[in-house]
Image: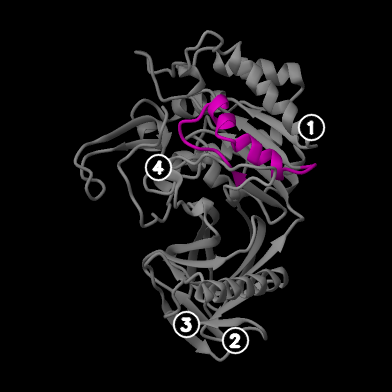
Amino acid sequence: MNQFINGLICWLVWGSWLITHLAAGQTFTFGAQVKKGYTIVDTSVRYQSARGYGFDLNTSAQLINRSATNGFVTSSQPFYFSVAVPQEGNYKVTVTLGDTQDRSLTTVKAESRRLMLHHVATQKGEIKRISFVVNIRRPEISTGGRVSLKPREVGKLDWDDKLTLEFSDGRPCVNAIEIEKTDTPITVYLAGNSTVVDLDEEPWAAWGQMIPCFFGPGVSIANHAESGLSLGSFSNSHRLDKVLSVIKPGDYLFIEFGHNDQKEKGPQDGAYQSYTERLKLFVSKAREQGALPVIVTSTARRSFDVYGKSVNTLGDYPEAAREVAKQENVPLIDLNRMTTAFYDALGVENSKKALVHYPANTFPGQNQPLADNTHFNPYGAYELARCIVEGIKASNLGLKKYVITMPTFDPAHPDPVEGFYWPPSPNQSTLKPDGN
């Protein structure tokens, strides 16, 4: 019993220190003291909950010191750095990237492969300091209960008690990391299915995990989507309760469902029955909290007729979503129409390159071809995220002023597949997400 009490006291003391320390901000530098007060971290430091920070997930990096005030870590393989955080919410992360003697190229992902920074290049002698916001969440709900996680979600980085960053690309050079709790960003909550969710294994991806890289630190993306869910199962698994317990006035709730609602065959189910009623419920609940709902029509499935034109496989569901948006005076992002134009622009064969279509043996242990016409690979997910950004602009949402400047995107003229590069994360799977 005494051993238990002593352990509990140690845990409480460490927890109190961590809360106080993170309130003031955690700062880490690699190999050199870039600023007074930074914690110098050697590459031998592995993440442990008792320590609260370190290199993680069995990955490592090489330490290079240029001077007493300039050092960085790099690797030819992706590497992870995690920091324990005492509570859920938004954390401003600032990374210092570059090398005084050579060029660098860095991509940063957070948690379950959320794209935060894409291909940040520095020239020899150039150092960049860039900030973004990572949303951290826990299954527990402050108003009571907890989210009913699926077995495949248990242990997922999106739901744990630490903030994890993945660094990769041609030559990542990470000088320093700063993390501080922040309550100032607008938070965009995403409610949806496998076309929206953060997918943590290659080659699967969805637009919700790509869209963070298009916003500056004034916006945080909180992706509560999960594979296989309909409006009903999202609510029944207490995910709507979770969102409503943390959403605040001025935040947004983006709602995209339809693929799995379409399969529900109860007497009250249907595009103009339960689907319409539940969409209106999500809208009203968001508004009760002072948040701004946005309806997103379902991504089109890849399906072509004999003439090579896209075919609607979602029945009345996209039109029902448009009707609810009109009736409830809610902004609409018509992703269904945009993805249809996207597929038509790519064509029957080339459109496969936006989805999980790969011949056998493309990935280790993949003995059979992958041919999925619903779920996207990183290129397709990135292009859909660009569609969402254009929808934000077209709807004149207040969010648009936080969008990082990029050329206007037209899904009828997508980015070339060959010009897109996504540094793969280490984990891979041939198991498709739930839903279709």
Quarter assignment of residue 348 = top left
Task: Tell me the element at label 2.
Answer: loop
> Is 161 in front, or is 127?
161
Q: Is residue 81 visible?
A: yes
Q: Nearer the viewer, mark 3 or mark 2?
A: 3
Q: Is residue 331 visible?
A: no
Q: Residue at x 75, y 20 (%)?
A: 328
Left or right relative to 273: residue 204: left
Residue 292 part of the magenta-drawn span: no
Q: Which residues are magenta?
A: 222-250
Q: Which residue is mark 2?
A: 33
Distance Cα–Cα, label 2 vs label 4: 39 Å
Q: Which residue is mark 3?
A: 42
Q: Residue at x 79, y 42 (%)?
A: 250
> Is 143 in front, or is 152?
143
Q: Residue furthest top?
A: 267
Q: Residue at x 77, y 31 (%)?
A: 287
Dot 3: few (<14), some (14–19), or many (≥20) neighbours within 10 Å? some
Left or right relative to 28: residue 420: left
Q: Which residue is mark 1?
A: 288
